[in-house]
Amino acid sequence: RIGDIPAINETTAADGLVLLSLVSNFYTLEYKEPGLFEKFLAYEGLDGILAEHRRRGLPPSGFKEAYQRFAKSLVQVGEGGGEDRLLGLGFEWLLETNPYRAADNRIQARLYWRGVPLAAAQARLFTRRNGQIEETLLTTDEAGRVWFSPTPGSELLLNAVQMQQPSAKFPAPAGSAWISYWTTITFALP
């Protein structure tokens, strides 16, 4: 049910890597104060959107953005193996290295937008360890890949955001000036 903690409580049939995913509905928010949209774009590395926003004659505040989330989580059950795989989400991370089996603790992840690797996209890696959160800024290479080396005992969330103008190709709730798409992948290392 919505709001349950934990969000899922299931028994698996076998040991191995379990993939969980969620595609949210569209939600909307309104930028009521000038400057908030610009701060969001700068933080997410989407500076080119601001020029398009102005070109379209949109105001600095008082407009709506629709957003949708594409989330994956990897959970290791027992000692079995397994690999992450593409689930066909519109915006998706693929861990090309099983984080529970990485011999050198170096993880390779690849970002996909509409099934195609996404180059030159900003990503953020959030690492929680011992109650502290560290944020690392990454950029995908020409093949859509990033690499990182997490510390054992960490919980990790890898995030990326893309933004589109609503259109027939990118439908959004009525009145939305923009649509943001958020993808995350999470896992925790023992």
Image: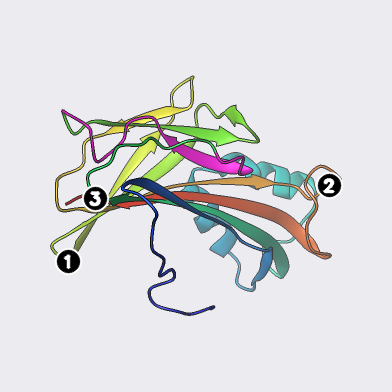
In the picture, measured across the screen, residue 57 lies left or right of residue 118, that is right
Residue 26 numbered mark, or none: none
Whether tag 1 and tag 2 are in contact, CB under 8 A, the answer is: no
Please name which of the two marks, 1 or 3, marks the residue nearer to the observer: 3
Whether tag 2 and tag 3 are in contact, CB under 8 A, the answer is: no
Q: Which of marks 1 and 3 is nearer the N terminus?
A: 3
Residue 78 numbered mark, or none: 3
At label 3, the amino acid type is: Gly
Q: Where is residue 77 in the image (x, y as percent from the top left)?
A: 29, 52
Q: Main secondary structure of the magenta part?
A: loop
At label 1, the amino acid type is: Gly
At label 2, the amino acid type is: Ser
Q: Earlier in the sequence, mark 2 or mark 3?
A: 3
Task: Name the residue carrying label 1.
Answer: 131
Considering the numbered disc 1 on the image, is that residue within a helix, a strand or a loop?
loop
In this picture, is 103 found above or below 163? above
In percent of the image, x 62 and y 61: which residue is there?
A: 24
Task: Name the residue carrying label 2.
Answer: 167
Q: Position of residue 114 (x, y in %)?
A: 65, 36
- Magenta residues (range): 87-103
- In front of the other: 22 or 52: 22
Q: Determine if the magenta segment contains residue 82.
A: no
Asked which quadrant contains residue 162, the reply is: top right
Label 1 crowding class (10 Å Cα cut-off): few <14, some 14-19, many 20+? few
In percent of the image, x 15 and y 53: which residue is there?
A: 153
Considering the numbered disc 3 on the image, is that residue within a helix, a strand or a loop?
loop
Q: Please tell me how many numbered marks the rendered image carries.
A: 3
